[in-house]
Image (cartoon, rainbow, N blue to C red):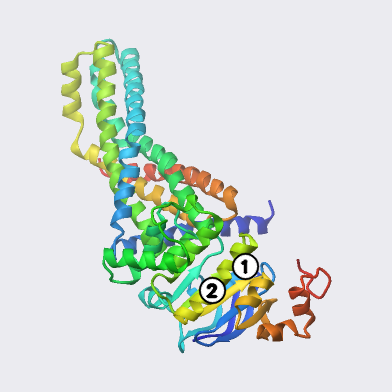
Amino acid sequence: MSRSRKVSLLAGFLRQVGEAWILFAETFRNLFRKPWEKKNFLQQLEEIGARTLPVVSLTAAFGGLVFGLQTYVGFHRYVGQGSEAYGGPIISLGLTKELIPILVGLMVAGRVGSSMAAEIGTMRITEQVDALFTLGADPNRYLVVPRTAAAFLMLPCLTLFGDIIGIICGTFYNVTLMGVNGTVYLRNTLLYLQFWDVVSGLIKAAVFGVIIAVMGCWQGLKAEGGAEGVGRATTRTVVIASICILIVNFFLSSFLPG
Amino acid sequence: MIRIVDLHKSFGSKKVLNGVNLEIPKGETMVVIGQSGSGKSVLLKLLIGIMTPDRGEIRIAGRDVAPLRGEERLQVTRKFGMLFQAAALFDSMTVAQNVAFGLERYTDLGPDEIAGRVAGSLAKVGLQGIEGLMPHELSGGMKKRVGLARAIAYEPEIILYDEPSTGIDPIRADAINELIILLKNEMNVTSVVITHDMVSATKVADRMAMLYEGRIVALGTPDEIRNSPDPVVQQFIHGRAEGPIKNW
Protein backbone atom coordinates (compact mmCIF):
# COMPACT_ATOMS: atom_id res chain seq x y z
CA MET A 1 0.00 0.00 0.00
CA SER A 2 1.41 3.39 -1.01
CA ARG A 3 2.10 6.08 1.58
CA SER A 4 -0.50 8.46 0.14
CA ARG A 5 -3.12 5.68 0.29
CA LYS A 6 -2.27 5.06 3.96
CA VAL A 7 -2.51 8.78 4.72
CA SER A 8 -5.85 9.00 2.93
CA LEU A 9 -7.22 5.99 4.83
CA LEU A 10 -6.07 7.45 8.15
CA ALA A 11 -7.59 10.84 7.28
CA GLY A 12 -10.85 9.11 6.35
CA PHE A 13 -10.90 7.18 9.62
CA LEU A 14 -10.20 10.30 11.69
CA ARG A 15 -12.90 12.20 9.82
CA GLN A 16 -15.43 9.46 10.62
CA VAL A 17 -14.47 9.44 14.30
CA GLY A 18 -14.71 13.24 14.33
CA GLU A 19 -18.19 13.19 12.75
CA ALA A 20 -19.47 10.69 15.32
CA TRP A 21 -18.00 12.74 18.19
CA ILE A 22 -19.52 15.96 16.88
CA LEU A 23 -22.94 14.27 16.68
CA PHE A 24 -22.51 12.93 20.21
CA ALA A 25 -21.48 16.36 21.56
CA GLU A 26 -24.39 18.07 19.80
CA THR A 27 -26.80 15.46 21.14
CA PHE A 28 -25.46 15.84 24.67
CA ARG A 29 -25.87 19.62 24.46
CA ASN A 30 -29.40 19.34 23.09
CA LEU A 31 -30.37 16.91 25.84
CA PHE A 32 -30.59 19.86 28.23
CA ARG A 33 -32.41 22.22 25.87
CA LYS A 34 -36.15 22.64 25.57
CA PRO A 35 -38.46 21.83 23.88
CA TRP A 36 -38.15 18.08 24.42
CA GLU A 37 -39.76 15.73 21.95
CA LYS A 38 -41.67 13.80 24.62
CA LYS A 39 -43.83 11.80 22.22
CA ASN A 40 -40.81 10.57 20.28
CA PHE A 41 -38.99 9.77 23.52
CA LEU A 42 -41.88 7.63 24.80
CA GLN A 43 -42.12 5.84 21.44
CA GLN A 44 -38.41 5.04 21.61
CA LEU A 45 -38.70 3.79 25.19
CA GLU A 46 -41.29 1.32 23.95
CA GLU A 47 -39.30 0.39 20.84
CA ILE A 48 -35.99 -0.12 22.62
CA GLY A 49 -37.39 -1.46 25.90
CA ALA A 50 -40.65 -3.37 25.62
CA ARG A 51 -40.17 -4.64 22.08
CA THR A 52 -36.64 -5.87 22.72
CA LEU A 53 -37.62 -7.74 25.89
CA PRO A 54 -38.43 -11.10 24.20
CA VAL A 55 -35.08 -11.21 22.37
CA VAL A 56 -33.18 -10.22 25.51
CA SER A 57 -35.06 -12.82 27.59
CA LEU A 58 -34.21 -15.61 25.19
CA THR A 59 -30.56 -14.54 24.88
CA ALA A 60 -30.12 -14.16 28.64
CA ALA A 61 -31.82 -17.50 29.32
CA PHE A 62 -29.53 -19.47 27.02
CA GLY A 63 -26.52 -17.38 28.07
CA GLY A 64 -27.26 -18.34 31.69
CA LEU A 65 -27.80 -22.00 30.80
CA VAL A 66 -24.58 -22.38 28.82
CA PHE A 67 -22.54 -20.45 31.38
CA GLY A 68 -24.03 -22.65 34.11
CA LEU A 69 -23.17 -25.75 32.09
CA GLN A 70 -19.52 -24.82 31.49
CA THR A 71 -18.98 -23.73 35.09
CA TYR A 72 -20.45 -27.01 36.29
CA VAL A 73 -18.17 -28.96 33.93
CA GLY A 74 -15.15 -26.91 35.03
CA PHE A 75 -15.67 -27.48 38.75
CA HIS A 76 -16.67 -31.10 38.31
CA ARG A 77 -13.67 -31.93 36.15
CA TYR A 78 -10.87 -29.87 37.71
CA VAL A 79 -11.86 -29.37 41.37
CA GLY A 80 -13.86 -32.49 42.05
CA GLN A 81 -17.31 -33.82 42.70
CA GLY A 82 -19.27 -31.73 45.21
CA SER A 83 -17.40 -28.53 44.39
CA GLU A 84 -19.94 -27.52 41.70
CA ALA A 85 -21.96 -25.56 44.27
CA TYR A 86 -19.10 -23.04 44.39
CA GLY A 87 -19.82 -22.17 40.77
CA GLY A 88 -22.80 -19.98 41.77
CA PRO A 89 -20.83 -16.76 42.45
CA ILE A 90 -18.74 -17.26 39.31
CA ILE A 91 -21.83 -17.66 37.16
CA SER A 92 -23.53 -14.63 38.70
CA LEU A 93 -20.41 -12.48 38.52
CA GLY A 94 -19.67 -13.45 34.91
CA LEU A 95 -23.25 -12.86 33.86
CA THR A 96 -23.89 -9.54 35.60
CA LYS A 97 -20.51 -7.92 34.93
CA GLU A 98 -19.71 -9.17 31.44
CA LEU A 99 -21.88 -11.61 29.57
CA ILE A 100 -25.37 -10.09 29.93
CA PRO A 101 -24.36 -6.43 29.25
CA ILE A 102 -22.46 -7.55 26.15
CA LEU A 103 -25.19 -9.88 24.90
CA VAL A 104 -27.86 -7.22 25.48
CA GLY A 105 -25.65 -4.61 23.75
CA LEU A 106 -25.07 -6.82 20.72
CA MET A 107 -28.75 -7.81 20.50
CA VAL A 108 -29.93 -4.20 20.72
CA ALA A 109 -27.28 -3.14 18.18
CA GLY A 110 -28.68 -5.75 15.78
CA ARG A 111 -32.35 -5.09 16.41
CA VAL A 112 -32.61 -1.41 17.31
CA GLY A 113 -29.40 0.17 15.97
CA SER A 114 -30.02 -1.22 12.50
CA SER A 115 -33.64 -0.07 12.56
CA MET A 116 -32.58 3.45 13.61
CA ALA A 117 -30.11 3.62 10.72
CA ALA A 118 -32.69 2.29 8.24
CA GLU A 119 -35.47 4.62 9.40
CA ILE A 120 -33.36 7.78 9.55
CA GLY A 121 -31.48 6.80 6.37
CA THR A 122 -34.77 6.48 4.48
CA MET A 123 -35.91 9.82 5.91
CA ARG A 124 -32.66 11.39 4.78
CA ILE A 125 -32.85 10.00 1.26
CA THR A 126 -36.49 11.03 0.82
CA GLU A 127 -35.68 14.55 2.13
CA GLN A 128 -37.85 14.08 5.24
CA VAL A 129 -34.90 15.17 7.40
CA ASP A 130 -34.65 18.40 5.36
CA ALA A 131 -38.42 18.80 5.70
CA LEU A 132 -38.08 18.58 9.51
CA PHE A 133 -35.66 21.48 9.41
CA THR A 134 -37.87 23.64 7.19
CA LEU A 135 -40.83 23.01 9.52
CA GLY A 136 -39.00 24.20 12.61
CA ALA A 137 -37.81 20.89 14.08
CA ASP A 138 -34.06 20.51 14.62
CA PRO A 139 -33.31 17.00 13.23
CA ASN A 140 -30.87 16.33 16.08
CA ARG A 141 -33.42 17.22 18.76
CA TYR A 142 -36.26 15.49 16.97
CA LEU A 143 -34.50 12.27 15.92
CA VAL A 144 -31.22 11.77 17.75
CA VAL A 145 -31.88 13.06 21.28
CA PRO A 146 -35.00 10.92 21.99
CA ARG A 147 -33.31 7.80 20.66
CA THR A 148 -30.09 8.35 22.59
CA ALA A 149 -31.87 9.21 25.85
CA ALA A 150 -34.18 6.19 25.51
CA ALA A 151 -31.28 3.83 24.75
CA PHE A 152 -29.29 5.25 27.68
CA LEU A 153 -32.18 4.50 30.04
CA MET A 154 -33.49 1.24 28.59
CA LEU A 155 -30.24 -0.71 28.14
CA PRO A 156 -29.60 -0.88 31.92
CA CYS A 157 -33.23 -1.96 32.46
CA LEU A 158 -32.91 -4.70 29.85
CA THR A 159 -29.59 -5.74 31.34
CA LEU A 160 -31.01 -5.96 34.87
CA PHE A 161 -33.86 -8.04 33.53
CA GLY A 162 -31.35 -10.20 31.62
CA ASP A 163 -29.23 -10.59 34.79
CA ILE A 164 -32.21 -12.00 36.68
CA ILE A 165 -33.19 -14.38 33.85
CA GLY A 166 -29.56 -15.49 33.35
CA ILE A 167 -28.94 -16.17 37.05
CA ILE A 168 -32.22 -18.08 37.35
CA CYS A 169 -31.33 -20.22 34.32
CA GLY A 170 -27.76 -20.83 35.57
CA THR A 171 -29.19 -21.89 38.92
CA PHE A 172 -31.84 -24.03 37.21
CA TYR A 173 -29.17 -25.90 35.23
CA ASN A 174 -26.94 -26.57 38.23
CA VAL A 175 -29.51 -27.15 40.99
CA THR A 176 -32.48 -28.62 39.16
CA LEU A 177 -30.88 -30.44 36.24
CA MET A 178 -27.48 -31.46 37.67
CA GLY A 179 -28.52 -31.94 41.31
CA VAL A 180 -26.04 -29.48 42.85
CA ASN A 181 -26.75 -28.64 46.50
CA GLY A 182 -29.14 -25.68 46.19
CA THR A 183 -28.60 -24.28 49.68
CA VAL A 184 -24.82 -24.08 49.30
CA TYR A 185 -25.10 -22.80 45.72
CA LEU A 186 -27.45 -19.93 46.65
CA ARG A 187 -25.61 -19.11 49.91
CA ASN A 188 -22.32 -18.76 48.02
CA THR A 189 -23.96 -16.70 45.30
CA LEU A 190 -25.47 -14.25 47.79
CA LEU A 191 -22.27 -14.17 49.83
CA TYR A 192 -19.87 -13.31 47.01
CA LEU A 193 -21.99 -11.38 44.50
CA GLN A 194 -21.73 -7.70 45.45
CA PHE A 195 -24.08 -4.85 44.69
CA TRP A 196 -21.33 -3.08 42.77
CA ASP A 197 -20.90 -6.09 40.43
CA VAL A 198 -24.46 -5.62 39.21
CA VAL A 199 -24.15 -1.81 39.06
CA SER A 200 -20.95 -1.92 37.00
CA GLY A 201 -22.76 -4.09 34.43
CA LEU A 202 -25.60 -1.58 34.32
CA ILE A 203 -23.17 1.33 33.82
CA LYS A 204 -21.63 -0.54 30.91
CA ALA A 205 -25.08 -1.13 29.44
CA ALA A 206 -25.91 2.60 29.62
CA VAL A 207 -22.69 3.41 27.75
CA PHE A 208 -23.49 0.74 25.14
CA GLY A 209 -26.94 2.31 24.71
CA VAL A 210 -25.41 5.66 23.85
CA ILE A 211 -22.95 4.00 21.44
CA ILE A 212 -25.74 2.13 19.63
CA ALA A 213 -28.05 5.14 19.31
CA VAL A 214 -25.33 7.56 18.19
CA MET A 215 -23.98 5.05 15.64
CA GLY A 216 -27.46 4.26 14.26
CA CYS A 217 -28.44 7.93 13.98
CA TRP A 218 -25.05 8.98 12.60
CA GLN A 219 -25.08 6.35 9.87
CA GLY A 220 -28.71 7.12 9.06
CA LEU A 221 -28.11 10.87 8.82
CA LYS A 222 -25.19 10.42 6.43
CA ALA A 223 -26.88 7.77 4.26
CA GLU A 224 -26.86 8.53 0.56
CA GLY A 225 -27.35 6.66 -2.69
CA GLY A 226 -30.88 5.25 -2.41
CA ALA A 227 -31.83 1.83 -1.08
CA GLU A 228 -28.25 0.56 -1.39
CA GLY A 229 -27.04 3.46 0.78
CA VAL A 230 -29.62 2.67 3.45
CA GLY A 231 -28.54 -0.99 3.38
CA ARG A 232 -24.90 0.06 3.81
CA ALA A 233 -25.80 2.37 6.71
CA THR A 234 -27.67 -0.47 8.43
CA THR A 235 -24.82 -2.94 8.06
CA ARG A 236 -22.21 -0.40 9.15
CA THR A 237 -24.22 0.48 12.24
CA VAL A 238 -24.34 -3.13 13.43
CA VAL A 239 -20.66 -3.79 12.65
CA ILE A 240 -19.26 -0.53 14.08
CA ALA A 241 -21.53 -0.55 17.16
CA SER A 242 -20.70 -4.21 17.91
CA ILE A 243 -16.96 -3.63 17.61
CA CYS A 244 -17.18 -0.47 19.73
CA ILE A 245 -19.16 -2.36 22.40
CA LEU A 246 -16.49 -5.07 22.65
CA ILE A 247 -13.61 -2.57 22.77
CA VAL A 248 -15.31 -0.18 25.20
CA ASN A 249 -16.30 -3.14 27.40
CA PHE A 250 -12.66 -4.07 27.86
CA PHE A 251 -11.72 -0.56 28.96
CA LEU A 252 -14.73 -0.21 31.23
CA SER A 253 -13.93 -3.58 32.82
CA SER A 254 -10.39 -2.33 33.43
CA PHE A 255 -11.38 1.05 34.88
CA LEU A 256 -14.59 0.37 36.77
CA PRO A 257 -13.79 -0.61 40.38
CA GLY A 258 -14.48 -4.12 41.60
CA MET B 1 -37.14 40.64 -0.37
CA ILE B 2 -34.38 38.16 -1.32
CA ARG B 3 -30.93 39.29 -2.40
CA ILE B 4 -28.21 36.76 -3.18
CA VAL B 5 -24.72 38.20 -3.45
CA ASP B 6 -21.66 36.34 -4.77
CA LEU B 7 -22.81 32.97 -3.45
CA HIS B 8 -20.31 30.10 -3.56
CA LYS B 9 -20.76 26.45 -2.66
CA SER B 10 -18.47 23.49 -3.32
CA PHE B 11 -18.63 19.79 -2.49
CA GLY B 12 -15.06 18.55 -2.22
CA SER B 13 -13.33 19.72 -5.39
CA LYS B 14 -16.63 20.19 -7.28
CA LYS B 15 -17.72 23.83 -7.45
CA VAL B 16 -21.50 23.84 -7.67
CA LEU B 17 -22.20 27.55 -7.22
CA ASN B 18 -19.51 29.94 -8.32
CA GLY B 19 -20.62 33.48 -7.57
CA VAL B 20 -24.41 33.56 -7.93
CA ASN B 21 -26.02 37.00 -7.82
CA LEU B 22 -29.81 37.32 -7.87
CA GLU B 23 -32.45 39.70 -6.57
CA ILE B 24 -36.09 38.71 -6.09
CA PRO B 25 -38.55 41.47 -5.11
CA LYS B 26 -41.45 40.81 -2.74
CA GLY B 27 -44.40 39.09 -4.39
CA GLU B 28 -42.46 37.96 -7.47
CA THR B 29 -42.31 34.42 -8.80
CA MET B 30 -38.75 33.74 -9.88
CA VAL B 31 -38.14 30.54 -11.83
CA VAL B 32 -34.59 29.22 -11.85
CA ILE B 33 -33.92 26.92 -14.79
CA GLY B 34 -30.87 24.84 -15.55
CA GLN B 35 -29.65 21.35 -16.30
CA SER B 36 -29.90 18.53 -13.80
CA GLY B 37 -26.96 18.84 -11.43
CA SER B 38 -26.45 22.53 -12.20
CA GLY B 39 -26.93 23.48 -8.54
CA LYS B 40 -30.59 24.57 -8.55
CA SER B 41 -31.57 22.42 -5.56
CA VAL B 42 -28.41 23.48 -3.74
CA LEU B 43 -29.44 27.11 -4.26
CA LEU B 44 -32.83 26.41 -2.64
CA LYS B 45 -31.24 24.54 0.27
CA LEU B 46 -28.85 27.45 0.84
CA LEU B 47 -31.76 29.89 0.79
CA ILE B 48 -33.73 28.03 3.43
CA GLY B 49 -30.67 27.19 5.55
CA ILE B 50 -30.47 23.40 5.12
CA MET B 51 -26.95 24.04 3.76
CA THR B 52 -24.52 26.84 4.55
CA PRO B 53 -22.62 28.68 1.80
CA ASP B 54 -18.83 28.69 1.57
CA ARG B 55 -18.92 32.40 0.75
CA GLY B 56 -21.40 35.10 -0.11
CA GLU B 57 -24.52 36.68 1.31
CA ILE B 58 -28.18 35.73 1.40
CA ARG B 59 -30.14 38.82 2.37
CA ILE B 60 -33.75 38.37 3.44
CA ALA B 61 -35.52 41.69 3.98
CA GLY B 62 -32.10 43.37 4.10
CA ARG B 63 -30.49 41.06 6.68
CA ASP B 64 -27.71 38.60 5.81
CA VAL B 65 -29.05 35.29 7.11
CA ALA B 66 -26.24 33.00 5.92
CA PRO B 67 -24.22 33.19 9.17
CA LEU B 68 -27.24 32.77 11.49
CA ARG B 69 -27.57 29.66 13.66
CA GLY B 70 -29.95 28.22 16.24
CA GLU B 71 -32.99 30.25 17.30
CA GLU B 72 -32.06 33.20 15.08
CA ARG B 73 -31.94 30.92 12.06
CA LEU B 74 -35.24 29.34 13.04
CA GLN B 75 -36.89 32.77 13.01
CA VAL B 76 -35.74 33.19 9.41
CA THR B 77 -36.72 29.66 8.38
CA ARG B 78 -40.22 30.45 9.70
CA LYS B 79 -40.59 32.88 6.77
CA PHE B 80 -40.12 30.02 4.29
CA GLY B 81 -42.32 27.18 3.14
CA MET B 82 -40.86 24.52 0.88
CA LEU B 83 -42.39 22.02 -1.50
CA PHE B 84 -39.91 19.19 -1.95
CA GLN B 85 -39.38 17.33 -5.22
CA ALA B 86 -41.00 14.10 -3.94
CA ALA B 87 -43.13 15.99 -1.37
CA ALA B 88 -41.07 14.56 1.57
CA LEU B 89 -44.17 13.78 3.60
CA PHE B 90 -43.44 12.12 6.95
CA ASP B 91 -44.49 8.59 6.17
CA SER B 92 -45.19 7.63 9.78
CA MET B 93 -47.79 10.43 10.11
CA THR B 94 -51.26 11.00 8.71
CA VAL B 95 -51.97 13.79 6.23
CA ALA B 96 -53.37 15.95 9.05
CA GLN B 97 -50.30 15.38 11.25
CA ASN B 98 -48.06 16.27 8.32
CA VAL B 99 -49.87 19.53 7.61
CA ALA B 100 -50.06 20.40 11.32
CA PHE B 101 -46.34 19.77 11.90
CA GLY B 102 -45.11 23.29 11.11
CA LEU B 103 -48.12 24.90 12.80
CA GLU B 104 -47.34 23.11 16.06
CA ARG B 105 -43.78 24.38 16.04
CA TYR B 106 -44.10 27.83 14.52
CA THR B 107 -47.33 29.02 16.15
CA ASP B 108 -49.05 29.04 19.54
CA LEU B 109 -52.37 27.85 18.13
CA GLY B 110 -54.52 25.43 20.09
CA PRO B 111 -55.57 21.99 18.76
CA ASP B 112 -58.94 23.22 17.41
CA GLU B 113 -57.38 26.16 15.60
CA ILE B 114 -54.68 23.88 14.17
CA ALA B 115 -57.34 21.44 12.94
CA GLY B 116 -59.15 24.36 11.29
CA ARG B 117 -55.94 25.60 9.61
CA VAL B 118 -55.13 22.06 8.43
CA ALA B 119 -58.57 21.71 6.82
CA GLY B 120 -58.25 25.20 5.32
CA SER B 121 -54.81 24.52 3.83
CA LEU B 122 -55.97 21.22 2.38
CA ALA B 123 -59.02 22.94 0.90
CA LYS B 124 -56.77 25.56 -0.71
CA VAL B 125 -54.93 22.83 -2.62
CA GLY B 126 -58.18 21.11 -3.55
CA LEU B 127 -58.06 18.24 -1.07
CA GLN B 128 -60.79 17.70 1.47
CA GLY B 129 -61.64 14.87 3.83
CA ILE B 130 -58.28 13.10 3.50
CA GLU B 131 -56.88 14.15 6.89
CA GLY B 132 -56.80 10.59 8.20
CA LEU B 133 -55.01 9.01 5.24
CA MET B 134 -51.38 7.94 5.35
CA PRO B 135 -48.92 9.20 2.69
CA HIS B 136 -48.61 5.72 1.11
CA GLU B 137 -52.34 5.84 0.34
CA LEU B 138 -51.95 8.99 -1.82
CA SER B 139 -51.13 9.33 -5.53
CA GLY B 140 -48.03 11.29 -6.63
CA GLY B 141 -50.08 14.40 -7.43
CA MET B 142 -51.94 14.25 -4.12
CA LYS B 143 -48.66 13.92 -2.23
CA LYS B 144 -47.40 17.09 -3.92
CA ARG B 145 -50.57 18.93 -3.00
CA VAL B 146 -50.39 17.75 0.62
CA GLY B 147 -46.73 18.86 0.62
CA LEU B 148 -47.88 22.25 -0.61
CA ALA B 149 -50.64 22.42 2.03
CA ARG B 150 -47.99 21.68 4.66
CA ALA B 151 -45.74 24.42 3.25
CA ILE B 152 -48.46 27.10 3.27
CA ALA B 153 -50.26 26.11 6.50
CA TYR B 154 -48.27 28.51 8.72
CA GLU B 155 -48.55 31.30 6.14
CA PRO B 156 -44.91 31.82 5.14
CA GLU B 157 -43.80 34.90 3.22
CA ILE B 158 -41.63 32.96 0.77
CA ILE B 159 -42.41 29.60 -0.85
CA LEU B 160 -39.69 27.52 -2.46
CA TYR B 161 -40.70 24.91 -5.03
CA ASP B 162 -38.20 22.18 -5.88
CA GLU B 163 -39.14 20.68 -9.27
CA PRO B 164 -42.91 20.95 -8.66
CA SER B 165 -43.89 19.22 -11.91
CA THR B 166 -41.36 16.37 -11.81
CA GLY B 167 -42.71 12.84 -11.40
CA ILE B 168 -46.37 13.59 -12.17
CA ASP B 169 -48.37 13.51 -15.41
CA PRO B 170 -48.80 16.73 -17.48
CA ILE B 171 -52.39 17.32 -16.31
CA ARG B 172 -51.47 17.06 -12.63
CA ALA B 173 -48.35 19.13 -13.32
CA ASP B 174 -50.52 21.87 -14.78
CA ALA B 175 -52.81 21.70 -11.73
CA ILE B 176 -49.74 22.34 -9.56
CA ASN B 177 -48.79 25.28 -11.82
CA GLU B 178 -52.27 26.72 -11.34
CA LEU B 179 -51.87 26.34 -7.58
CA ILE B 180 -48.55 28.19 -7.62
CA ILE B 181 -50.22 31.09 -9.45
CA LEU B 182 -53.26 30.98 -7.15
CA LEU B 183 -51.15 31.05 -3.98
CA LYS B 184 -49.11 33.95 -5.31
CA ASN B 185 -52.27 35.93 -6.07
CA GLU B 186 -54.13 35.00 -2.88
CA MET B 187 -51.32 35.12 -0.34
CA ASN B 188 -49.01 37.60 -2.11
CA VAL B 189 -46.04 35.31 -1.41
CA THR B 190 -42.62 35.57 -2.96
CA SER B 191 -41.93 32.33 -4.83
CA VAL B 192 -38.77 30.68 -6.06
CA VAL B 193 -39.41 27.77 -8.40
CA ILE B 194 -36.66 25.57 -9.71
CA THR B 195 -37.41 23.40 -12.68
CA HIS B 196 -36.17 22.16 -16.02
CA ASP B 197 -39.71 21.89 -17.33
CA MET B 198 -39.98 24.84 -19.73
CA VAL B 199 -43.78 24.62 -20.05
CA SER B 200 -44.17 24.93 -16.30
CA ALA B 201 -41.47 27.60 -16.07
CA THR B 202 -43.05 29.83 -18.73
CA LYS B 203 -46.49 29.50 -17.17
CA VAL B 204 -45.67 30.45 -13.58
CA ALA B 205 -42.71 32.82 -13.93
CA ASP B 206 -42.72 36.57 -13.53
CA ARG B 207 -39.01 36.40 -14.28
CA MET B 208 -36.62 33.55 -15.06
CA ALA B 209 -32.95 33.01 -14.33
CA MET B 210 -30.76 30.38 -15.94
CA LEU B 211 -28.08 28.72 -13.83
CA TYR B 212 -25.11 27.38 -15.79
CA GLU B 213 -21.62 26.47 -14.60
CA GLY B 214 -22.40 27.83 -11.14
CA ARG B 215 -23.52 31.29 -12.29
CA ILE B 216 -26.67 33.04 -13.45
CA VAL B 217 -26.09 33.41 -17.21
CA ALA B 218 -29.49 34.81 -18.19
CA LEU B 219 -32.15 36.79 -16.36
CA GLY B 220 -35.40 38.25 -17.64
CA THR B 221 -39.09 37.78 -18.28
CA PRO B 222 -40.17 34.54 -19.98
CA ASP B 223 -40.32 36.42 -23.32
CA GLU B 224 -36.84 37.88 -22.83
CA ILE B 225 -35.44 34.44 -22.02
CA ARG B 226 -37.21 32.88 -24.99
CA ASN B 227 -35.68 35.52 -27.29
CA SER B 228 -32.24 35.47 -25.66
CA PRO B 229 -29.40 35.42 -28.20
CA ASP B 230 -27.25 33.34 -25.78
CA PRO B 231 -26.65 29.94 -27.44
CA VAL B 232 -26.53 28.25 -24.00
CA VAL B 233 -30.02 29.53 -23.21
CA GLN B 234 -31.34 28.61 -26.67
CA GLN B 235 -29.92 25.09 -26.45
CA PHE B 236 -31.51 24.56 -23.02
CA ILE B 237 -34.98 25.97 -23.71
CA HIS B 238 -35.24 24.06 -26.98
CA GLY B 239 -33.85 20.89 -25.42
CA ARG B 240 -31.17 20.29 -28.07
CA ALA B 241 -28.34 17.82 -27.54
CA GLU B 242 -26.08 19.78 -29.91
CA GLY B 243 -24.69 23.11 -28.70
CA PRO B 244 -22.31 24.72 -26.25
CA ILE B 245 -23.64 22.69 -23.27
CA LYS B 246 -21.55 19.55 -23.43
CA ASN B 247 -21.24 18.28 -19.86
CA TRP B 248 -24.32 16.04 -19.88
Q: Residue B109 location in percent, x, y?
A: 28, 70
Q: Quadrant of residue B247?
A: bottom right
Q: Residue B241 location in percent, x, y?
A: 81, 68
Residue at the (53%, 65%) spot, across then down: B84
For label 2, the crowd category at 10 Å Cα-Cα, with few meaning under 14, some 14 to 19 and many 20 or more, is: many
Q: Which residue is mark 1?
A: B12
Q: Is residue B165 above or below residue A146?
A: below
Amino acid marked by disc 2: Ile
Instruction: Let me know if marks 1 and 2 both belong to one chain.
Output: yes
Of badges 1 and 2, nearer the viewer stands 2
Residue at the (46%, 50%) spot, across then down: A119
Q: Quadrant of residue B140?
A: bottom right
From the image, which quarter does the C terminus of chain B lie in?
bottom right
Q: Residue B57 location in percent, x, y?
A: 52, 84
Going from N to C along the chain, the mark reached first, 1 or 2, is 1
Report the number of discs.
Answer: 2
Outermost residue, bottom side: B62
Amino acid marked by disc 1: Gly
Does residue A193 appear in this view? yes
Q: Secondary structure at mark 2?
A: helix
Tag 1–tag 2 contact (CB < 8 Å): no
Closer to us: B207 or A41: B207
A146 on left or right of B194: left
Chain label for disc 2: B
B90 on left or right of A224: left
**Residue B180 - label:** 2
